């Protein structure tokens, strides 16, 4: 019996590849297993090779592994592309009508399992598109689970299509399950142990977790132009906007989107935008507008490979420094970068309070791997949303007789803020340099004082910024440094290294900017061996650390081929 299995299905786009993986995740998570799934697909309108990889475990884990235990091939291309991910003892399930594997091409003891998926759907008068459902039934048998865990999901998945469709899918899946049991019933190499601590879990991708966090953070307005990898956020908002009492608008472009969100924020509504690097490039002038008008704004930026269009459906961490330095002129901002689904929710919720408190733009920096991968999380994580904090927002009772929206006297640079309709709270939200009441000015002394006021926020933010979260051994031989979605693969790599007797630690930056240089220097300079792990080609976090603390991390593991890190790759790239 095993406590972790990695499964992958591949085939042509349009054959329900992604759907099969998501259904498998739901089936096992409902029975108390820990699950995750990551999809891969080309940037094409139709066609191309699609795959989804699923991890199922009886104990908590933090990322997928590179090696596959079970590969489901709906076409020959899947075998050709993914054979190098197999290991000794892997299973390969294929349709003999489409795939003719050569056993010499596979690792030793690979078990080739011929399952006539095309014949099964034909005999049941079902469409060829339902071979994915046959494969799901076969998978349940290969993992040693009861078929009923799949029927629950099928009933939910096709509830709106009626009983006939539900029964058809169950019959097709049952045929796949029975086909394995009848012909390969003695195979139990990848049977899963029962989950150790069954409990209810929520299943969602990173974008959906960001969205739930935004809603619990009080968000009421979002203007988002579609762009991978943040589109699941749009689906969440559009599907539930009426019941949640929110406004979602699809603007004509990203420029309009950020300006709409700024307008909503000036009106007193918690607002956000979401995009990727190319879309954010169009938003940069609007970002500066939020800086000079000191308007709270939350921006979810899902990174993907560039430059230009780059690789729209793949992942990378190449825009950290872009986000830090974007915008003309100098003004404060905050950058958060979640490393897992729990942090997606928590940091998104926190982002809205930070934006309100400091009256600055706050970024939630994610990436395609985190945005689109499916994860499970304990429901308790989402049970206790924080009470929203409005910062220095005045009411008619608290406003001073001589209200100055851009009052320069506060030591932290944060002035009291009114919203339209507040008696005696009138001000001009001016994109020009302005005085304390918002009137345009080019006076050099006022200009300098107003710039100083806005920059004092950085000092205030840094003084309240949290230190990076530390995982692992206090007395470590090797200390990893990371931000964002590299967290999971590193934690899994640390498990492997621990089994080999090596003491390791991870210093993870979920709060990425601004950083307290002195505190960071004290934290890092005593470490024996620092290794920076990033999904870009220049080590952008390491550059930022060097800039603010003077600590130069010499050893860097960098990956920028559009794919996420795997634990095995991290270990392979370490020098011992």
Image: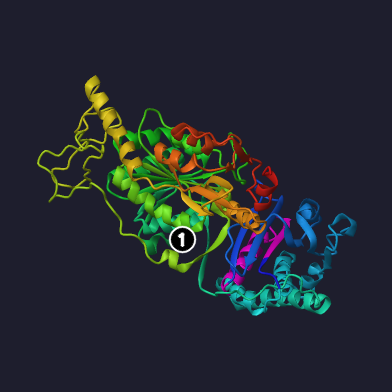
Question: Which segment did they paint magenta?
Answer: 5-32
| Residue 229 located left or right of residue 184 | left
Where residue 501 appears, x then y in whole percent? 65, 56
Residue that numbered label 1 is attached to: 239
At 30% from the left edge and 42% from the top edge, which residue is drawn?
359
Q: How is the image coloured?
A: rainbow
Rendered location of residue 567, percent (x, y): 65, 52
Residue 27 magenta: yes
Badge 1 element = helix
Image point (35%, 33%), residue name: 331
Outermost left residue:
401
- Number of residues whose C-alpha sits closer than 10 Å to that of mark 1, classed few (under 14), some (14–19) or many (20 or more): few
Q: Foreground: 154 or 516?
A: 516
Does residue 360 appear anywhere in the picture?
no
Residue 469 visible in this rendered orientation of the protein: yes
60 vs 413: above or below: below
**From the image, which quarter does the N terminus lie in?**
bottom right
Is residue 71 inside the magenta stretch?
A: no
**Image height check: is 55 above or below 433?**
below
């Amino acid at each position: 019996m095993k406590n972790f299995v990695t499964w992958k299905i591949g085939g042509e786009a349009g054959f329900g590849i992604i759907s099969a993986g998501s259904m498998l995740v739901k089936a096992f998570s409902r029975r108390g297993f820990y699950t995750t799934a990551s999809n891969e697909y080309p940037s094409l309108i139709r066609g191309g090779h699609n795959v989804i990889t699923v991890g199922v475990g009886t104990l908590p884990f933090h990322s997928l592994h590179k090696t596959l235990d079970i590969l489901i091939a709906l076409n020959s291309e899947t075998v050709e592309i993914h054979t190098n991910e197999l290991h000794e003892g892997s299973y390969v399930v294929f349709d003999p009508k489409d795939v003719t594997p050569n056993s010499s091409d596979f690792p030793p003891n690979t078990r080739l399992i011929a399952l006539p998926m095309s014949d099964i759907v034909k005999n049941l008068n079902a469409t060829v598109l339902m071979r994915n459902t046959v494969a799901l039934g076969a998978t349940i048998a290969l993992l040693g689970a009861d078929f009923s865990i799949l029927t629950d999901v099928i009933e939910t998945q096709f509830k709106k299509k009626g009983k006939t469709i539900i029964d058809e899918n169950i019959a097709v899946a049952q045929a796949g399950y029975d086909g394995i049991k009848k012909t390969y019933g003695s195979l139990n190499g990848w049977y899963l142990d029962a989950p150790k601590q069954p409990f209810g879990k929520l299943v969602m991708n990173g974008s959906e977790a960001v969205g739930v966090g935004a809603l619990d953070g009080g968000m009421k307005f979002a203007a988002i132009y579609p762009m991978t990898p943040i589109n699941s956020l749009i689906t969440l908002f559009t599907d539930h906007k009426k019941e949640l009492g929110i406004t979602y608008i699809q603007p004509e472009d990203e420029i309009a989107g950020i300006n709409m969100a700024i307008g909503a924020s000036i009106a007193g509504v918690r607002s956000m935008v979401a995009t990727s690097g190319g879309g954010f490039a169009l938003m940069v002038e609007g970002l500066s507008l939020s800086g000079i008008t000191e308007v709270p704004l939350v921006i979810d930026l899902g990174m993907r490979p560039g430059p230009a269009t780059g690789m729209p459906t793949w992942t990378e961490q190449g825009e950290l420094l872009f986000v830090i330095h974007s915008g003309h002129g100098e003004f404060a901002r905050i950058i958060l970068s979640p490393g897992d689904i729990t942090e997606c929710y928590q940091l998104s919720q926190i982002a809205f309070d930070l934006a309100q408190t400091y009256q600055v733009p706050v970024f939630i920096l994610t990436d395609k791997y985190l945005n689109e991968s499916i994860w499970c999380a304990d429901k308790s994580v989402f049970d206790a949303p924080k009470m929203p904090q409005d910062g220095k927002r005045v009411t008619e009772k608290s406003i001073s007789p001589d209200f100055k929206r851009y009052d320069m006297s506060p030591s932290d640079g944060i002035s009291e803020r009114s919203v339209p309709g507040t008696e005696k709270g009138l001000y001009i939200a001016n994109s020009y340099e302005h005085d304390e009441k918002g009137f345009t000015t080019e006076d050099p002394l006022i200009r300098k004082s107003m710039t100083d006021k806005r920059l004092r926020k950085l000092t205030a933010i840094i003084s309240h910024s949290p230190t990076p979260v530390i995982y692992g051994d206090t007395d470590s031989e090797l200390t990893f440094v990371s931000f964002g979605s590299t967290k999971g693969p590193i934690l899994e790599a640390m498990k492997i290294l621990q089994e080999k007797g090596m003491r390791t630690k991870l210093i993870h930056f979920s709060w990425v900017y601004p950083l307290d240089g002195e505190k960071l220097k004290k934290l890092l300079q005593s470490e024996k061996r620092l290794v920076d792990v990033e999904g870009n080609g220049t080590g952008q976090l390491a550059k930022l650390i060097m800039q603010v603390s003077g600590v130069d991390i010499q050893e860097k593991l960098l990956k920028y081929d559009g794919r996420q890190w795997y634990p095995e790759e991290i270990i392979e790239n370490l020098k011992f």
